[in-house]
Image: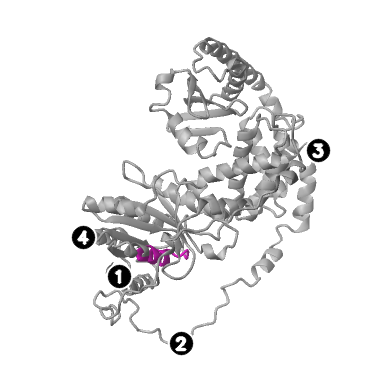
């Protein structure tokens, strides 16, 4: 059953609501839809789930209207998209920009609802009848698989896997049916003209030696990297030198005599100049691909410009999935719009993409860390920042840069050495603490990081320190034990800010890293309100030239803002993300 259908303008004016305009946006999942998708241009999928609700929406770009339907996700209402199209067409017929109330539309909507629901129920009963006949070997199969059955779709997926890879799959190598005696007949019935059987013979059937043990042995004899290691001489005894220098008494002499390092003003407090992108002159623009006569934009008109724009984004290191979704969002915002007489389609697409990128990269909440620190100081508690991320991205180095920046603003800092896993991690952080002349809380190695962090926060509270910077061990997003340990640290200590430290060098992997980190922290959270990633610290930004797409991919996936950007090896090489500069670089 449809719970809500809402019609409103892009400016937020509600024109008509199935449940009543007075209560349409109060406590409704439409609020989450507007905040998470519509305001940031993430509207490509036209589908969204929020709690027990599912939402579908569509636009009328020519009129600037949004149509949103809400229903229980367990119902799987298949007619909702058709209903939205019918409502959009009917409402556009009576829409007047000067009107703000359309109470009479309720009766027409009920008629449309009944008509669409009746149409949706008829095809389902008809398509269910030929199901058994479709499984017969000789039955012809229509393109696309017909009525969406279970076994038919599964067989199509399996045959698709066989066609996509030239080598035999793992299942073919180990299953007795992989020689084509059983699966070959079954898949041939779905292939149509036996094309799959011919391909299997070309790839290697039983007569071609696909399962020849001699071939397998030859493959195993190939040298593998890392296997051929030189034997250790027997007379070479392991060094008995103590490797754990985490004794608090041993701070590496001369710490009291050394003064805090001063490398000048941090780049966080400097304004970055934005390069102006050169634009075409009026005459050159007028004579280039002029699209006039106030024609409405269609999908075929937008495809060439969108494809060029997608390729450009991918060359700037934007993940392919993100570039595809962005182009779909731009297309959804332009379809049906009318262009002026001297407006090019490519320039309209470029402008729409620029607006979408600015919306996505602009933080939705305040990222003024200094203000939050002073607010926590007024409460009498230290402000806790936890740095998390995969291995080797520069968490400890950039943690020291953040500490240096905070010291320049007269904020007292305590470091917490909670990387008790990597050898040398405590010594590295101790070196930074000695150079910056700030206290460090450490308990050595093979300790519970959550307990170490708790002790550091308690110590900072006793010493009236303003900020605690918690260094954690690098971990891959698929490492379940280490992700559980990280979740325990966050749940036990409830930090004020969880920063994901990621490299600006990564492309598609940024999506996987951030998605799985956020998902793991949410799934393993024991708090009433699940904690996730609050902000992003991008490292190695000075090594990528114009390949700045990782910033866009990370923000798009997580919704968290980029709060710091590391751009060098010294303590001053930390700056803010300049949104306008990133957008210009992506589109130039």
Single out the mark in the foreground, 2 or 4. Answer: 4
The residue that appears at 31% across and 41% down in the rendered structure is 528
- The answer to the question of whether label 1 and label 2 lie on touching residues, with beta carbons closer than 8 A, is no
Q: Is residue 46 left or right of residue 282?
A: left
Along the polypeptide, which appears first: circle 3 or circle 4?
A: 3
Q: Residues within 10 Å of mark 4 (few under 14, many from 20)?
A: some
Q: Which residue is mark 2?
A: 234
The label number, if any, that marks residue 222 in the structure image? none
Measure the C-alpha gap from mark 4 to mark 1.
24 Å
Q: How is the image coloured?
A: one colour
405 shown above or below 424: above
Q: Secondary structure at mark 4?
A: loop
Where's residue 255, x and y in %? 28, 78
Along the polypeptide, which appears first: circle 1 or circle 3?
A: 3
Queried whether the magenta region covers residue 420, the answer comes back as: no
Along the polypeptide, which appears first: circle 2 or circle 3?
A: 3
Single out the mark in the foreground, 1 or 3. Answer: 1
Q: Secondary structure at mark 2?
A: loop
105 shown above or below 384: above
Where's residue 338, x and y in %? 67, 30
Q: Residues within 10 Å of mark 2 (few under 14, many from 20)?
A: few
243 shown above or below 429: below
The label number, if any, that marks residue 444 in the structure image? 1
Measure the C-alpha gap from mark 1 to mark 2.
32 Å
The stretch of residues the image draws in magenta is 392-404
The label number, if any, that marks residue 464 in the structure image? 4
The residue that appears at 35% across and 83% down in the rendered structure is 241
């Amino acid at each position: 059953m449809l719970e809500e259908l809402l019609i409103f303008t892009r400016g937020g004016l509600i024109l008509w609501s199935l449940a009543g305009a007075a209560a349409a946006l109060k406590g409704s999942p439409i609020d989450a839809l507007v905040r998470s998708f519509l305001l940031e241009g993430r509207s490509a999928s036209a589908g969204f789930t929020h709690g027990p609700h599912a939402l579908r929406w569509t636009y009328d770009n020519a009129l600037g209207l949004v149509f949103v339907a809400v229903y229980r996700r367990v119902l799987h209402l298949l007619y909702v998209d058709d209903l939205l199209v019918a409502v959009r067409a009917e409402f556009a017929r009576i829409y007047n920009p000067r009107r703000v109330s359309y109470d009479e539309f309720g009766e027409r909507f009920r008629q449309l609802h009944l008509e669409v629901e009746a149409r949706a129920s008829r095809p389902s009963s008809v398509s269910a009848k030929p199901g058994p006949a479709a499984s017969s070997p000789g039955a012809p199969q229509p393109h696309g698989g017909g009525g969406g059955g279970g076994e038919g779709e599964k067989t199509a997926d399996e045959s698709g896997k066989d066609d996509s890879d030239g080598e035999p799959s793992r299942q073919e190598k180990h299953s007795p049916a992989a020689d084509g005696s059983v699966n070959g007949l079954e898949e041939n019935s779905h292939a149509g003209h036996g094309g799959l059987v011919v391909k299997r013979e070309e790839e290697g059937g039983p007569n071609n030696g696909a399962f020849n043990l001699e071939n397998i042995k030859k493959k195993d004899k190939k040298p593998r990297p890392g296997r051929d290691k030189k034997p250790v001489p027997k007379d070479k005894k392991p060094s008995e030198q103590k490797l754990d220098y985490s004794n608090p008494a041993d701070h590496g002499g001369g710490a009291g005599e050394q003064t805090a390092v001063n490398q000048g003003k941090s780049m966080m407090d400097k304004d970055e100049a934005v390069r102006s992108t050169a634009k075409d002159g009026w005459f050159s623009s007028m004579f280039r691909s002029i699209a006039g006569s106030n024609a409405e934009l269609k999908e075929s008109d937008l495809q060439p410009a969108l494809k060029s724009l997608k390729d450009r984004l991918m060359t700037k290191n934007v993940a392919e999935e993100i570039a595809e979704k962005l182009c779909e969002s731009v297309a959804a915002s332009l379809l049906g719009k009318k262009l002026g007489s001297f407006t090019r389609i490519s320039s309209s697409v470029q402008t729409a993409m620029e607006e979408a990128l600015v919306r996505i990269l602009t933080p939705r909440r305040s990222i003024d860390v200094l203000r939050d620190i002073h607010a926590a100081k007024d409460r009498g508690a230290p402000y806790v920042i936890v740095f998390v991320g995969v291995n080797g991205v520069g968490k400890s180095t950039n943690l020291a840069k953040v500490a240096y920046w905070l010291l320049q603003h007269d904020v007292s800092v305590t470091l917490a050495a909670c990387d008790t896993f990597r050898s040398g991690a405590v010594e590295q952080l101790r070196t930074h603490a000695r150079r910056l002349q700030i206290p460090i809380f450490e308990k050595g190695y093979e300790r519970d990081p959550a307990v170490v962090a708790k002790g550091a926060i308690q110590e900072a509270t006793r010493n009236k320190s303003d900020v605690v910077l918690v260094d954690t061990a690098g971990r891959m997003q698929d490492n379940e034990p280490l992700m559980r340990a990280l979740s325990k640290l966050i749940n036990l200590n409830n930090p004020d800010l969880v920063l994901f430290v990621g490299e600006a060098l990564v492309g598609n992997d940024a999506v996987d890293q951030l998605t799985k980190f956020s998902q793991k922290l949410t799934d393993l959270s024991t708090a009433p309100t699940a904690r996730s990633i609050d902000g992003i610290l991008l490292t190695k930004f000075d090594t990528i030239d114009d390949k700045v797409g990782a910033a866009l991919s990370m923000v798009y996936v997580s919704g968290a803002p980029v709060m710091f950007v590391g751009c060098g090896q010294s303590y001053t090489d930390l700056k803010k993300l300049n949104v306008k500069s990133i957008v210009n670089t992506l589109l130039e």
